[in-house]
Amino acid sequence: MAVTVKSAAIIGLDVFEINVEVDTINSIPQVSIIGMGDTAISEAKERLRLSIKNSSFSFPQTKVVINLAPADIKKEGSNYDLAMAIGILLKENIIRDFNKNEIIFLGELSLDGSLRAINGVLPIICGLANLGIKKIIVPYENLKEASFIDNIETLGAQNLSQVVSYLNNEGDLKTLKQNVDDFLNKKEEFNVDFANIKGQQIAKRALEIAAAGAHNVLMSGSPGAGKTMLSKAFMSILPPLSKQEAIELTKIYSISGLLDRSKPLITSRPFRSPHHSASAVGIIGGGSNPKPGEITLAHRGVLFLDEMVEFPRKTLEVLRQPLEDKVITISRAQTSIQYPANFILLGAMNPCPCGFLGDNKKQCTCSEYQINKYRSRLSGPLLDRIDIQIKIQRLNEDELLDNNNNVENSETIRKRVIKARKIQSERYKNEGILTNSELNSKLIKKYCKIDDTTKQFLKNAINSFNLSARAFDRILKISRTIADLEEKENIEVSHIAQALQLRSF
């Protein structure tokens, strides 16, 4: 009679319970694994045989058939090694019977019987907790990562022998519980502070507004104007992660294999800066087993595209849908996976090929044709999705030599940003969004109210600037953020005027 133990599969961020069924047949000794597994699962045959042998247990001298059910779900990776080994030992009566519906087994086996860490433990545990599972056994190296979920008991084992002893009531496994808040309360350190940046008051104000409302920004300016330094300083004014955001980010980095085992929780907002040679798949994610791309790794943080126009146009165009929907759907023949992609796009570019168009010191040497061709790499629909578009001028001699110490530092600006974010969080607590940038047309109508005077001013602006419907919505979103920074309930003419100035392209 077949025995069944439980494991789990993760596809994207969705978790599925897997039944590992084990039975034996009186035939030539061999191991057969069925149930739509990949190469890593097929290669588990020898890992199982040697890990059981080297743990001083006997391996069946018959044919062992292992079925990973349900068979219509594709299984990948080495997560199922431990569950398959437990099933074999249970079939051999080396393990006494236990409540097999209560415990989930995860882990990769080494040839000596020790357990190796696996990727994706945190999202698996979150998913299993939602399915009502009460206990899970994982490799000891994954225990820190697994310790943040309250309503499930997580046990860490260093090898197969420890798991067998625990199931036979002959030993205990280590457990650990940690509080997310203890990690998030630690003070963050940033490499660049706004106090270190001379001048650029308009750019600093624009970035403050962008941080407060999570708006996308494109900066254009000549080489050396300070675009990259401003972008790096931008991280220092973003609000700290909430508990929900930290868990969400850690799940993404866990399935991507980018989580530091010694630091099991992502505690600061990501800053992703891919090179302009990055492919479209590298940016949005994909592959035969679709993995998160840069836009998902930048979730709740910043995707910085330096020299933005140097990226292939095809690569930039794939950003249009996630910028609008805040998610990316990767479709393949056998599956469709959705990853979150709620990031702030921060772009920097030169105004022309030589870089000095509009520069106050150096003459541009580009022809009109070259300038138009260069700028055409950014399509109109993509630019329409970038809320704030500003020009950065190089500093003059006086600004460079100015040693004024009364410049606002990042901490002061960050306090205003946090206050504005709290206003938005309270306003949208029943809407399922966190910031003004996430407002849709229905919510814009509800929360971006303007009086008759402001409405007339906006009407004139639409005619003067030939604003599209999307640009109109984005002006209102930016205006809402400016009003929040000033702690005003309604949008005023001055807020609309500031928002229009931040689309200076």
Image (cartoon, rainbow, N blue to C red):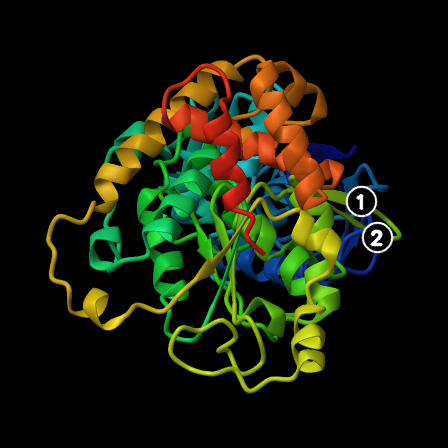
Task: Pick out the residue farthest to the bottom.
Answer: 365
235, 333: nearer the viewer: 235
Task: Pick out the residue farthest to the right.
Answer: 333
The answer to whether residue 18 of the structure is visible from this angle is yes
Q: Is residue 345 above or below residue 124?
A: below
10, 221: nearer the viewer: 221
Q: Position of residue 200 (x, y in %)?
A: 33, 56
Amino acid type, residue under disc 2 in the picture:
Arg
Q: Quadrant of residue 422?
A: top left
> Disc 1 vs disc 2: Cβ atoms closer than 8 Å?
yes
Q: Position of residue 246 (x, y in %)?
A: 43, 36
Q: Position of residue 270 (x, y in %)?
A: 44, 50
Q: Which mark is residue 173?
A: none
Amino acid type, residue under disc 1 in the picture:
Ser
Q: Position of residue 371 (x, y in %)?
A: 65, 76
User: Residue sitting at 60 percent across and 61 percent down?
Assistant: 47
Q: Which residue is mark 1?
A: 336
Q: Quadrant of residue 376?
A: bottom right
Please give the count of numbered marks on the rendered protein: 2
- Secondary structure of the residue carrying tag 1 is strand
Quarter holding the N terminus is: top right
User: Residue sitting at 48 percent across and 50 percent down?
Assistant: 302
Q: Is residue 237 above or below residue 365?
A: above
**Image side of residue 95 versus residue 146, left or right:** right
Q: CA distance from mark 1 to mark 2?
A: 6 Å
User: Residue sitting at 43 percent across and 39 percent down?
Assistant: 209
The answer to whether residue 149 of the structure is visible from this angle is no
Q: Which mark is residue 332?
A: 2
- Secondary structure of the residue carrying tag 2 is loop
